[in-house]
Amino acid sequence: NARNTRLGRCEIFDAEHHRGLVTRLRLERTLREAFEAGDMCVHFQPEVDLASGRWVAAEALLRWRDGEGRCRAAREFIDIIEGCGLIVPIGRWMLHEACRMARQWPLRDGRGPKLRVNLSARQFAQASLVEDVVAALAASGLQPGRLCLELTESALLPDVDAAAQTLTRLRDLGVCVALDDFGTGYSSLAYLKRLPIDVIKLDQSFIGGLPDDPYDLAIVQAVAGLARKTGVDIVAEGVETEAQAHTLRECGVVRAQGYLFSRPVDHETLLRGFAVA
Ligand code: C2E
Ligand code: MG
Ligand code: MG
Ligand code: MG
């Protein structure tokens, strides 16, 4: 009888597992069809200069208009499209779209805002990555120096030497490289030392506790000092309050991104913002 019970449990577990799998497969299909139907779009979140408030860059963020017409943020479905590999064609499309749009951004003194595009580990591992970047730049006419690719540790982790080679090839094109979600991985400092990184984006988990949390404050001060001394640029992510922005300025962080300044917006809204900010 004990055996039957165990079998029973096993069946229940399997049924749940199966349901989870079916849900996931259905979602993958929905997302693939949405991409093919043109229901994915690019939104942008500006990055500001903390001293002047000017919008100096913008990050492209993937959005999905679902069946009910709601705009879904990347965090709601990015794991699914990464898991099934759909991130590769979608990421390539994002890169092309975002470069094409960034080409329309207004220049100031001959220089335009930087475009930041996220790359997932799967994309970074593609043998065609560098050619994809070259193609997107050529098709859009965007100056390579205006494009910055954001990577997380997970993209660099599998093979640091191969990652260094790819990053060097990208840098040789004139494209810049940012380490995203800095401080959340296992060896952010080691990567900073071994890889050609231009920008670190300090993860929002260290910003939320400012100015009161002594650990967050110490981390922000330390990373800002590190950035200053190594000549790497630093951008704070997820800034939501004026008090946080104030503390960042005091720590010597000059650039930030977050709901305090702007939520991610569609391209038209971004263009209007560039005109005034
Ligand atoms: P990320 O690159 O670290 O992007 C920042 C995320 O934080 C965005 O979420 C943004 O909407 C959100 N955020 C910005 N400011 C604030 C704030 O003040 N408070 C809070 N709570 N959140 C804020 P989103 O758009 O859902 O993107 C989530 C992640 O999905 C991104 O994290 C990035 O890793 C990935 N992702 C987004 N678009 C793409 C893409 O085109 N390709 C790839 N490979 N990954 C993408
Ligand atoms: Mg990012
Ligand atoms: Mg981030
Ligand atoms: Mg993130």
Image (cartoon, grey):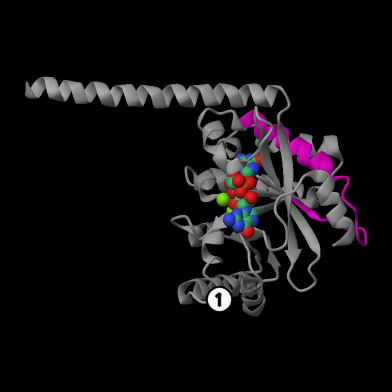
Is residue 42 visible in this depiction of the protein? yes
Q: Nearer the viewer, residue 229 or 164?
A: 229
Residue under the image location 55 percent in, 76 percent down: 211
Q: Tell whether position 220 is magenta.
A: no
Q: Nearer the viewer, residue 97 or 23?
A: 23
Residue that badge 1 annotates: 211
Image quadrant assignment for residue 166: top right
| Extreme residue in the right direction | 109
Q: Nearer the viewer, residue 140 or 30?
A: 30
Q: Nearer the viewer, residue 268 or 136?
A: 268
Badge 1 element: loop
Residue under the image location 60 percent in, 36 percent down: 123
Q: Position of residue 259 (x, y in %)?
A: 67, 59
Q: Position of residue 263 (x, y in %)?
A: 70, 54
Seen in the picture, residue 47 relative to 241 is either above or below; the reply is above
Q: Tell whether position 94 is magenta.
A: yes
Q: Position of residue 206 (x, y in %)?
A: 52, 65
**Quadrant the N terminus occupies:** top left
Q: Which residues are magenta?
A: 88-115
Seen in the picture, residue 46 relative to 89 is either above or below; the reply is below
Residue type, numbered disc 1: Pro
Q: Position of residue 101 (x, y in %)?
A: 83, 42
Residue under the image location 50 percent in, 59 percent down: 188
